[in-house]
Image: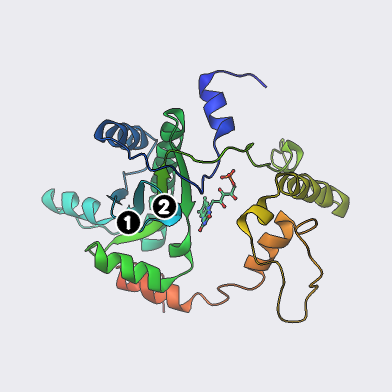
Amino acid sequence: MITNATIETLMNRKSVRKYTDRKLDDDELETIVRAGQQAAFASQLYSVLYSTEKPIAFDAAIWFLICVDVHKLERFMKLRGWDIVTNDLTLLLLGMQDASYMAQNMVVAAESLGIGSCFLGAVSSSAQRIRALSEKLTLPERVLPMVELVMGYPDEEFAPRPRYPLAFTLFENRYPEFTDKEVEEAMRVMDDGYLQQGYYRKQNVKIQVEGGRRDDYTFDNYSWTEHISRKWGQWAASPDELLDALKERGFSFMKSNE
Ligand SMILES: Cc1cc2nc3c(=O)[nH]c(=O)nc-3n(C[C@H](O)[C@H](O)[C@H](O)COP(=O)(O)O)c2cc1C
């Protein structure tokens, strides 16, 4: 791989879950958010709210809420005499991209300043969290909490976490048909990487499963692929509550004939 300061910053970024007491100053905050704004956008369909009031997850210095924001678009289009006719699904898909690229730029900018970060995804599965944050932060309709993000100066040191091999990620010209062996090889790379770091032991993750599944895992064999399988093999089966919360936020996804 080629390396330079930017690539090094990207390759060294990791989610930090232990922070020192050091606060971020105004210059740091401004730099991080301005660098975030400089990401590519479809229509700048985002807003960022922040707070330094504790409690903050992992006792980080600052908490951000990155929102998809169609409200500001509506406001300026109105001033130009336009109404939005584009469907909410398209707006949401584009808005999530705008907000994501902006958020990741913030993370990388922070990393380059020695400031660590961690995303928190509860709003993607919890209607209750969407409602609570919307109320607390007085979000207008058409503003949807997309992801929480905490930052601060790291108080832990460890190697970057593993990723799938490139052969399981990058495909030239056509998508391959994976053999089970190829899938297992990608799983092994991830699982070995997490086991080597003792990640789940350090986090004291609950590794015994209820419900009659295999329950003989220990911190020596509990793996990333098992951890992830358990999430998406158990959580959030119904979209109904989330759809209700999105509707309350002013986003509706009915087919036009329903
Ligand atoms: C959308 C999203 C949601 C996440 N939610 C959480 C979370 O709720 N709690 C947490 O500790 N980490 C969360 N993370 C961090 C991931 O666990 C982390 O990025 C992933 O395990 C890879 O580790 P790394 O960032 O250190 O490379 C989230 C990351 C993303 C992008």
Above or below for 12 versus 143: above
Query: Between disc 1 and disc 2, whose residue precedes?
Result: 1
Of residues 42 and 142, the one nearer the viewer is 142
**Numbered label attached to residue 59:** 2
Of residues 247 and 215, the one nearer the viewer is 215
Q: What is the three-letter code of the residue carrying label 1?
A: Lys
Residue at position x 28%, y 62% in the image: 142
Residue 252 showing in the rendered view: no
Residues marked 1 and 2 touching at CB (< 8 Å): yes
Query: Measured from the top left, where is residue 55 in percent x and y?
Result: 35, 59
In the displayed structure image, the side of residue 157 where residue 36 appears, left or right: left
Quarter occupied by residue 68: bottom left
Query: Measured from the top left, where is residue 238 in percent x and y?
Result: 54, 77
Above or below for 203 versus 212: above
* Structural distance between the alpha carbons of marks 1 and 2: 8 Å
* Image quarter of the N terminus: top right
